[in-house]
Each structure stands twice: as C-alpha cells, then as structure tokens.
C-alpha cells in the first residue's frame, strides 16, 4: 500500500499545493558531492549531467527547451576536467553536442555568455574559433556553441541539429510507485 501525501500551506491567505516561501532559517548547505542524480543522469561535483546524442539531433533552442523541461539547462563548462567528464559520457558521438554558451550583443566578453548566467572564466575554442563574426552578412547565424568529440568548441548556426548536454544541481530525491508506475521527485540542493 502506498500513501500519497499532499503538502499544502497557506501563503497570503491562499492555499497552494506546494510549500510557500518562509522567513525562517534556510536549510543547511550540502557539501559538494552530496545528493543524487535521477536515473539516466551522471553525477559530477555538485551537478548532474545528461547527454543526448542519438541519431536524431535537435536545434539549440529545442535542446535548451528539452533541458528546461527537466529543471536543467544546457551545460555550462568551467574546467578542462569538466570537458573530459562530458566527453566520457558522450559515448555515441553521432553529432557534436550543443552546450549552454551563446552570443548575445548585450553581454560582455564579446557577447558570449552561459545560459545559466555563471561566469565565463574558461573557454576551450578550437583553433580559429569563434569565427562567426568574420562571416559578414551571416553574423547572426553562428550564435550558439557546440562541442566537438575532442572537447574543443565551435560557434555554429543555432538551427543545426546536434546532440546536447544538460546540467542541474544534484538533488535530494525520493521515488515512489503508484499503480505500476515509478515517479521520481527531485528537490534540488
């Protein structure tokens, strides 16, 4: 027998089906490496990673949307070790993979920035890249970044079909079954 508990709380005199913000002391910060990843995701440091590289790729906007459906974003990469980790879990290699680096004219660093708004302190451009700015009239066409199988980066047209890598913070999760289905609940830490 499975008992399903519904959490409700009153916020501003309204009842919601979730826990509302509180001014109480926040929960303790978990140490790096604690927490877990959902099935199909790979743990590394404080994060969980998912790489899709099937035969049918996705455009950069489609890939980002897919990641966001899982409360994640396209991966931001901050070290050579992280590049190598992603290379190791990208085992099918049908395509290059989209990462969360994109060009926006409103950003510093010549317009490049991570979708998760983390600092751009590490880059791994392939020789001669990024080169989209040198394509003249096609300037707007290479605003997204893909990672080659060797880990080097290339700016490319965002509508090209590629694999992709998602990332989110590790979670403290539980799972339960209900009528022969398994549900996973991930609370990000």
Image: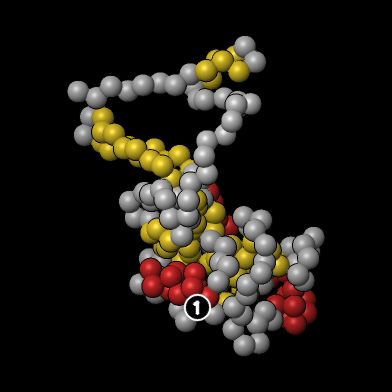
Question: How many labels, in total?
Answer: 1
User: Does the rendering let one see residue 79?
Assistant: yes
Position of 106 relative to 153 (above/below):
above
Q: Quadrant of residue 90?
A: bottom left
- Compared across the picture, whether 106 is left or right of 101 comes to right
Residue 79 place in picture, x, y as percent: 55, 71
The figure's colour scheme reads secondary structure
Residue 39 place in picture, x, y as percent: 33, 51
Closest to the observer: 186 or 95?
Answer: 186
Closest to the observer: 170 or 18?
Answer: 170
User: Does the rendering let one see residue 96?
Assistant: no
What residue is shown with label 1? 151
- Compared across the picture, whether 41 is left or right of 22 comes to left
- Residue at image location 52% in from the left, 44% down from the top: 29
Closest to the observer: 93 or 55?
Answer: 93
- Compared across the picture, whether 6 is left or right of 21 comes to left
- For disc 1, the neighbor class at 10 Å (few under 14, some 14 to 19, many from 20) is many
Q: Quadrant of residue 14?
A: top right
Residue 81 place in picture, x, y as percent: 49, 73
Q: Residue furthest bottom?
A: 127
Q: Which quadrant holds the N terminus?
A: top left
Q: Secondary structure at mark 1?
A: loop
Position of 66 relative to 75 (above/below):
above
Position of 39 relative to 91 (above/below):
above
Residue 40 place in picture, x, y as percent: 34, 55
């Amino acid at each position: 027998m499975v008992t399903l508990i519904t959490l409700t709380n009153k916020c501003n005199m309204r009842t919601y089906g979730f826990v509302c913000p509180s001014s109480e002391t926040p929960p303790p910060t978990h140490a790096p490496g604690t927490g877990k990843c959902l099935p199909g995701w790979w743990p590394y440091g404080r994060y969980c990673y998912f790489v899709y590289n099937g035969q049918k790729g996705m455009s950069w906007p489609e890939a980002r949307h897919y990641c966001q459906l899982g409360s994640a974003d396209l991966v931001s990469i901050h070290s050579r070790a992280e590049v190598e980790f992603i290379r190791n879990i990208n085992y099918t290699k049908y395509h290059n993979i989209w990462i969360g680096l994109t060009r926006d004219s409103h950003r510093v660093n010549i317009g490049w920035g991570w979708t998760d708004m983390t600092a751009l302190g590490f880059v791994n451009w392939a020789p001669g890249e990024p080169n989209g700015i040198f394509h003249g009239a096609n300037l707007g066409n290479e605003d997204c970044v893909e990672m080659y199988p060797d880990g080097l980066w290339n700016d490319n047209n965002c509508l090209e079909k590629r694999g992709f890598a998602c990332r989110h913070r590790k979670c403290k999760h539980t799972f339960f079954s209900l009528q022969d289905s398994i549900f996973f609940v991930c609370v990000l830490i």
